Every structure is written in C-alpha cells, then in structure tokens.
Amino acid sequence: MMGMQDRYTPGDDVGALDHWPFDNPLSAYRILSGAPVTSGRIDKGGPGHTTRYGIWRCTQGAFECTEQGDELMTVLAGRCCITWTGTGAQRRLEAGDTLFIQDQSRVIWDVTEEVTKVFFGHKPGGY
C-alpha cells in the first residue's frame, strides 16, 4: 500500500487518506461546532480483526462520540483537546503527545488545529 509504513514521527508525510464520514451508529457522533471532516487509512487489521493500526486526520471543529475499541494514539501534527463527558477530565494534545482512550469512552474532540494521529486499536470482539 502506498504511504504505508510501520514508523511515524511528528511532521512525517503520512501519504494518501480516504474520507471517513461521521456515520458509524455505534459511535453516535454529534457535531458540536464548525464542520469537522475526517479522513484516514487502516494500515493493518480492520474488519474481522481484534487489532488495527493506521492514520487518522480531522479538520477544525468539535464533535462528540463513543470510542470503538481501546486505542493508543500519538499526535503527529495539530492541536486538540479531548474531554471525557462522564467526568469532565480533559487532555490537551499536540504533536508528539500520546494518549490512551478506553473502549466505549464518550468523549468530545475539540480540534483547534487540524490533527493527524497514528493509532493502534484493540477490540476483543473484533472490529
């Protein structure tokens, strides 16, 4: 696959990404501000697998969603703030920051500068 690699560092060109619409009913997306647009690529795993990794990008804006799978992510570019709706806890992220989010966490993504992240996800029942 063009652009696929196993190592990414902040500022890397991640290659071509596909449009990923806010349409997964399990995630129950809700746009809160702006008009965020997401894109991404699964580099390994995906449907039928318990693990996957790849790249995700989101333009400015805010949305709420329920995360699908445990996910470890590292921000390669941009800035955002993630808020856990149940507790109000927040984490501000920028290039080089890493975060773990648990499966089924309800969070708000407030993207203030287009974010690109590399992610590794795990879901025991499969994606």
Image (cartoon, rainbow, N blue to C red):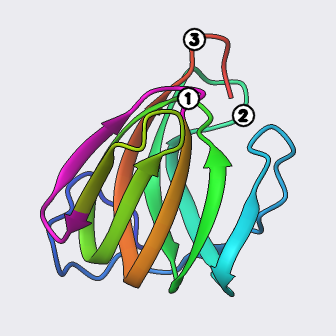
- Residue 40: horizontal and vertical position, in percent? 56, 66
| Numbered disc 3: secondary structure | loop
Q: Which residue is mark 3?
A: 124
Mark 2 in CB contact with mark 1 (< 8 angstroms): no
The x, y position of residue 118, in whole percent, is 34, 57
Measured as percent of width and height from the top left, residue 100 is found at: 31, 36
Picture quadrant where residue 36 is located: bottom right
Name the quadrant containing residue 3.
bottom left
Residue type at numbered disc 1: Gly
Disc sitting over residue 85 in the figure: none
- For marks 3 and 2, the one nearer the N-term is 2
Q: Disc 3 or disc 1, which is closer to the eye? A: 1
> Which residue, given by chain and number where applicable, does mark 1 sit on?
69
Front residue of this view, candidates 34 and 122: 34
Q: Which residues are magenta?
A: 93-105
* For residue 46, above or below residue 7: above
Q: Is residue 2 visible?
A: no
The answer to whether the residue labelled 3 contacts the one labelled 2, judged by CB atoms less than 8 Å apart, is no
Distance of label 2 from label 1 (alpha carbons): 12 Å
Type of the residue with mark 2: Pro
99 w.r.t. 75: above or below: above
Q: Where's residue 26, x and y in %?
A: 80, 37
Say whether residue 117 is visible.
yes
Mark 2 or mark 1, which is nearer to you? 1
Q: CA distance from mark 3 to mark 2?
A: 12 Å
Residue occupying image coordinates x 62% and y 34%: 68
Amino acid type at circle 3 is: Pro
Density class for disc 3 (Cα within 10 Å; few <14, some 14-19, many ≥20) is few
Q: Is residue 73 above or below residue 92?
A: above
> Quick one: label 2 or label 1, which is nearer the N terminus?
2
Residue tagged 2: 47
